[in-house]
Image (cartoon, grey):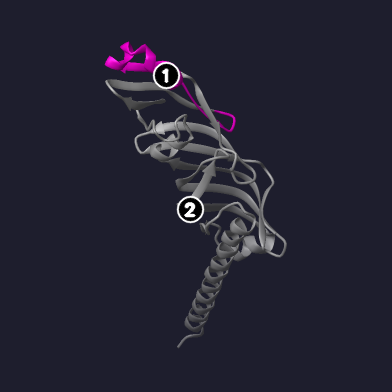
C-alpha cells in the first residue's frame, strides 16, 4: 500500500473520530442548555435544544454560539389568576455565550413564538371561559351568542393582549340588554412570562392566537 494511501486512510480515521467527538460534545451542550432553561425557572418542562454551530468544539473553545434553537410544547403563561398552556413554542437565539463552567448561557439576541388555543385564551376573558373565542378573519376574533356573535379585534399592547371594537351581529344586535359586559374592551396581561421575554405581537390565526416574543439582550439562563 502506497504511503499516500495510508496517509489518506489515517486522515479519514482521525477526521471521523473528530466529527464523532464533536457530535458527542454538542449533544452534551444541548442537554446542559435545556437543563439551564429549567433550573432558571424559564421553563417548567425540559425543552428540546438544537445547536447549529459546526464544528461545535471550535465554538465551545471560543465560548460563544452563533445559533441555538429551543422548542417546547408545554410552556405555560398566566394572567396572574388563570394558567394556560402555550403550544409549539420555539425560540431562535443568537450570540449565545456560555457561563459558569458551561452550566448556563447568556443570550445576545433572540425571538420566540407560540400558540394559545382559543378555548384556553377565553379563560382570561370576562366570564372565565363561558364566552369562547374563535377566529373571525385577519386581526379579528368572535364568540358565539344566542342569535349571532360578538366580533372584535385582537392585538397586543406591551405585555397585554387586548380585545376591543366588539359588536353584536345577527339577531343578537337587536338585543341591547345583552350588550353590557360583552361589548366592553377587555385586556389581560401575561404576567408569568419567563425572565427576559416580552410580548411583541398577538395575531389571531385559525388554530389559535399566535404570540410573538422578543428577548432582552443579556438574558441569562441557568445558575
Quarter occupied by the N terminus: bottom left
Q: In this view, does 145 lie above or below 104?
A: above
Looking at the rendering, in which quadrant would you find the C terminus?
bottom right
Q: Determine the CA span between mark 2 and mark 1.
A: 33 Å
The residue to which callout 1 is attached is 166
State which quadrant residue 81 falls in: top right
Residue picked out by circle 2: 72
Q: Is residue 56 above or below residue 172?
A: below
Which residues lie in the magenta part? 157-183
Residue 162 horizontal/vertical position (percent):
51, 26
Q: Position of residue 176 (x, y in %)?
A: 37, 12
Q: Residue drawn 43% across and 35% down?
A: 122
**Residue 166: within the magenta?**
yes
- Can residue 90 be found in the magenta stretch? no
**Position of residue 57 in the picture relative to residue 134 (left or right):** right
Question: Is residue 136 visible to the viewer in this orientation of the structure?
Answer: no
Q: Position of residue 43 (x, y in %)?
A: 56, 53
Residue drawn where x is 53% and y is 27% of the image = 187
Nearest to the eye among marks 2 and 1: give it.
1
**Kind of element beneath mark 2:** strand
Amino acid at each position: 500500500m502506497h504511503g499516500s494511501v495510508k496517509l489518506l486512510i489515517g486522515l479519514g480515521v482521525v477526521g471521523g473520530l473528530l466529527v464523532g467527538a464533536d457530535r458527542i460534545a454538542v449533544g452534551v451542550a444541548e442537554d446542559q442548555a435545556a437543563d439551564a432553561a429549567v433550573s432558571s425557572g424559564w421553563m417548567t418542562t425540559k425543552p428540546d435544544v438544537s445547536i447549529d454551530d459546526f464544528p461545535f468544539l471550535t465554538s465551545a473553545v471560543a465560548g460563544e454560539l452563533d445559533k441555538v434553537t429551543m422548542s417546547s410544547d408545554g410552556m405555560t403563561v398566566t394572567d396572574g389568576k388563570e394558567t394556560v398552556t402555550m403550544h409549539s413554542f420555539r425560540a431562535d437565539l443568537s450570540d449565545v455565550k456560555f457561563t459558569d463552567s458551561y452550566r448556563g448561557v447568556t443570550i445576545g439576541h433572540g425571538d420566540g413564538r407560540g400558540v394559545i388555543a382559543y378555548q384556553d385564551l377565553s379563560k382570561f376573558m370576562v366570564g372565565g371561559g363561558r364566552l369562547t373565542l374563535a377566529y373571525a378573519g385577519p386581526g379579528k376574533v368572535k364568540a358565539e351568542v344566542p342569535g349571532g356573535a360578538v366580533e372584535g379585534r385582537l392585538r397586543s399592547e406591551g405585555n397585554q393582549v387586548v380585545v376591543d371594537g366588539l359588536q353584536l351581529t345577527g339577531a343578537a344586535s337587536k338585543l341591547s340588554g345583552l350588550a353590557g359586559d360583552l361589548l366592553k374592551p377587555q385586556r389581560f396581561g401575561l404576567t408569568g412570562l419567563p425572565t427576559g421575554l416580552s410580548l411583541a405581537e398577538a395575531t389571531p390565526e385559525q388554530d389559535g392566537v399566535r404570540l410573538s416574543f422578543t428577548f432582552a439582550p443579556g438574558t441569562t439562563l441557568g445558575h
